[in-house]
Image: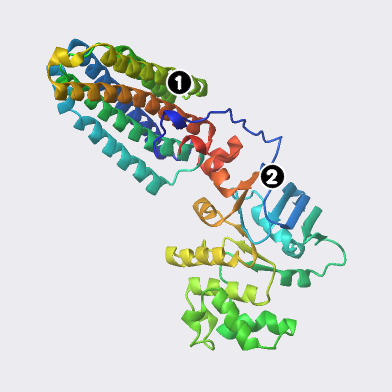
Amino acid sequence: MARETFQTALADLRAAVLDMGELVVKRLKTALAAFEADDEETARRVLQTDDQVNQRYLELESRCIDLFALEQPVASDLRLVAASFKIITDLERVGDLAANLAQYTLSRTAILPAVGIPEIGREAIDMLEDALVAYDDRVAEACRVVTSRDDDLDAKCEQASSQLVRNLIERDPIAATGNLETLIEDVESVLLTIRDLERIGDHAVNVAGRTLYVLEGDPELVY
Amino acid sequence: MSMTQNDSPTIETTVRTTEEQATDRSQPTGRPVIEARNLSVHYGDEQALQNVTMKIPDRQVTAIIGPSGCGKSTFLRSINRMNDLVDAASVDGDLLLDGTNVYEDDIDPVALRRRIGMVFQHPNPFPKSIYDNVAYGLRIQGSTDDLDERVEQALKRAALWDEVNDQLEKSALALSGGQQQRLCIARAIAVDPEVLLMDEPASALDPIATAKIEDLIAELAEEYTVVTVTHNMQQAARISDRTAVFLTGGKLVEYDDTETVFENPAHDRVEDYITGKFG
């Protein structure tokens, strides 16, 4: 095969994107476990190591730009580099959302009833993992399965938000806390966390869509 | 722009076109100026082009790419009957210019070449002055009215006027390679052809001169139909609206919008060629 160095660089890029994905998934799982266990030390560690993902992102961004500039990829090679360039942005954002979850674990006051955040979180992480497997295995059908799960995740997130509001209406949480400001902060954090989990699902859909762009070339999927 | 839950990608199956199904997935949008219909060329027993069928649209740049020996230059030279000059060459099929088959018996090849200018890989100015090079075709045509103005216009269209307007009597051979190539373009367009054929027009030039030629090709396409052969695929991607890929055996394998050919070619063999995996 010609251009062996370039083909090796593409294989290395793919592996490095998967490594970054693995790191992000691991941090998400750690942050979610810390949330469930109310483990502040672990949550703090997730926050303190957020820079790992950012560094990985910058390194891969630079690698993609080098490939564009020096190798001028075309056809499926171009699609792989372009899609990877976008996927690492999704992964970097998911890394930020893991940090958000860790931050919420540290700041909450545990006065609000559970609304199913761990279950939603596991669903979102599962979608992201499946999208990364599809990117690794280059399987279009697996990409479509990921995207088809997004509506269900969105519905669960909406349901969780509604449940929280219902709880607030039906009970008297201010009496429980005695502090309106703390209550407002907690409610905001829960709603934002639900939104973050829903966005992890969106990023998983993006990863799947961009993988489909690599496989099938529909440019709509990479914009 | 990040996709959110509300604008998640719509995913539909993309069906790969097989080589047998089509060589031209999307027809060119402009009026076809040149149309090849089952065009085949032999050099003696050797077939250089095999049943090429394609339409080349007006005032666009069409790039012809492919590995050495694939027939791309043969195709280009078929358009203005340059292959007539090769004794062993024989042509089958039709090559239409504005609907008229250029291989009809009553077509004068010399008159045809006035309508179809050609620029070659290596600049080939005549050993004459800059002015006389550009005026050459006009004088042969007998078009000597407003000769100065027509020479000036051709040099301006070829983006050379500003560099040579005070030295028109200087020998063309004293110009740089890039300037000589633009002079050859000026010479070709001075007689106001409809079509410009370019056979690797920048391959012998440095990057600066190449960039000037590429810019010039884009400007020329506003007035002329440009067909260019190039080995430089990045150049084809930069300058052309449509790209035709010829592969071994003189077959046109794919012909489509340039973006499509370089981002998502229909044929695996084209993919392998443009990504450098074969060729």
Residue A66 vertical position relative to residue B134 in the rendered view, above or below: above
Residue A45 visible to an observer of this rendering: no
As rendered, which of A192 and B185 lies closer to the eye? A192
Answer with left or right where residue A88 lies relative to residue B62: left
Residue A18 in the image, given as x and y percentages of width and height: 34, 26
Mark 1 residue type: Asp
Residue at figure coordinates x 34%, y 25% from the top left: A200
Same subunit: marks 2 and 1: no
Residue A36 visible to an observer of this rendering: yes
As rendered, which of A205 and B74 lies closer to the eye? A205
Q: Which mark is residue B264?
A: none
Residue named by callout 2:
B251
Q: Report the mark closest to the observer, 2 or 1.
A: 1
Residue B136 in the image, given as x and y percentages of width and height: 66, 82
Answer with left or right where residue B146 lies relative to residue B162: right
Residue B82 in the image, given as x and y percentages of width and height: 72, 64
Instruction: Locate the N terminus of chain B and report the quarter of the image it occupies.
Output: top left
Dot 1 crowding, Cα within 10 Å, few <14, some 14–19, many 20+: some
Residue B202 vertical position relative to residue A81 in the rendered view, above or below: below
Answer with left or right where residue B110 lies relative to residue B153: right
SS type, badge 2: strand
Residue named by callout 1:
A151
Dot 2 crowding, Cα within 10 Å, few <14, some 14–19, many 20+: many
Mark 2 residue type: Lys
Residue A67 in the image, given as x and y percentages of width and height: 38, 43
Measure the C-alpha gap from mark 2 to mark 1. 48 Å
